[in-house]
Image (cartoon, rainbow, N blue to C red):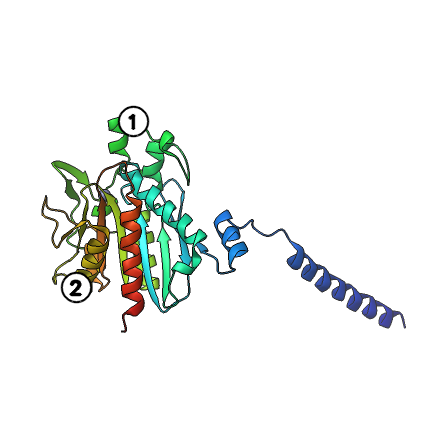
Amino acid sequence: MKKLFVRRAVAIGIVFIIFGVGLYIFLRPQKKPLPIVSVINKVENIGAVHTVIGQSIEKRNIDAYTYGTGKTHIAFVGGVHGGYEWNSVVLAYKFLDYLDANPGVVPTGLTVTVIPSANPDGLYKVVGKEGRFTVADVSTNKQVLASGRFNAHDVDLNRNFDCKWQPKSTWQTKIVSAGTKPFSEPEAVAIRDFALKDNPAVVVFWHSQSGNVYASQCEKGILPETINTMNVYAKASGYGAVKTFDAYVTTGDSEAWLASVGIPAITVELKTHETVEWEQNLAGVKALFEYYNQKKD
Ligand SMILES: [Zn+2]
């Protein structure tokens, strides 16, 4: 009799524990969603999915925001050159705000990912802030601005990718560090892993300053789709279209590595280091949306 009572007590106890754990899982405080997600959910319930694709050396998150669920995935990346090209980050955030306010602009055939700040440590050197910033936050010290091009290891991330990589590379007339080996830098790894996992149909990198759209290539020439993408964006935005960047020799750049793994990539260089040229870039982006939505593969 006593045994039976003990067994029942144990059984009831277990039931309570399971119920308690279930209740805890159900009611535990949820991580607060980012404003960007909550805003869009309120509007049309097709939110940006926020993911963290990696962390910088100083442990800042590298965020990605994805809109739509279409078959063809296209990606936009700002701020590879950090604070030196802070306007490319502003453009990317402005684009996110635009997509939040106009979710219907993403065609049903597309998935669009925006990585607004690919070098958050380099950006931090110049704006002294995480995430969003305003022009008032931007340092006017030329040396600080130039240092913001590099990550916290003073590596030029756009020389750290695995295409013709060399330990030293060039930026204009200067010698820059390209890291200790291809993908030695966590920020470059984040972009690499994102691309290999999601296999985007095209990646657009926003940089500054030349007012041109550049194609990309590694060892095997420019991918045909890269040429088309360059021309579509250039025509709609009014920027020049340049097949080969030949102002100086570069090695290990992200676009070239993407080309080497068969992913078309273009570089869009804003005209200055301060402007975002919103209407021009919106026209370029919309033209790409249309082009990739219609494209059958
Ligand atoms: Zn750049």
Q: What percent of the width, then of the height, locates residue 272?
A: 22, 38
**Residue ranking furthest to the top:** 141
Task: State which quadrant residue 71 falls in.
Answer: bottom left
Q: Which residue is drawn at 68% across and 60% down?
A: 21
Q: Which residue is drawn at 29% across and 42% down?
A: 276
Give, as a three-letter code, the residue at label 2: Leu
Name the residue beneath numbered marker 2: 223
Q: Quadrant of ligand 1?
A: top left
Q: Earlier in the sequence, mark 1 or mark 2?
A: 1
Q: Nearer the viewer, residue 186 or 210?
A: 210
Query: Around disc 1, counting alpha carbons within 10 Å, would you say few (fewer than 14), some (14 to 19), or many (20 or more)?
Result: few
Q: How far apart are marks 1 and 2 (CA)?
A: 39 Å
Q: In this view, does 249 lie above or below 224?
A: above
Quadrant where the image shows the C terminus: bottom left
Q: Nearer the viewer, residue 87 or 63?
A: 87
Q: What percent of the width, then of the height, locates residue 194?
A: 34, 58
Q: Residue at x 11, y 36 (%)?
A: 173
Task: State which quadrant residue 137 falls in.
Answer: top left
Q: Which residue is drawn at 28% across and 35% down?
A: 148
Give, as a three-letter code, the residue at label 1: Thr
Res. 200 in view:
no
Q: What percent of the width, then of the height, locates residue 217?
A: 15, 58
**Residue ranking furthest to the right:** 1
Mark carried by residue 30: none
Query: Is the C-beta of the residue carrying label 2 under 8 Å from the nearest atom of ligand 1?
Result: no
Name the residue beneath numbered marker 1: 140
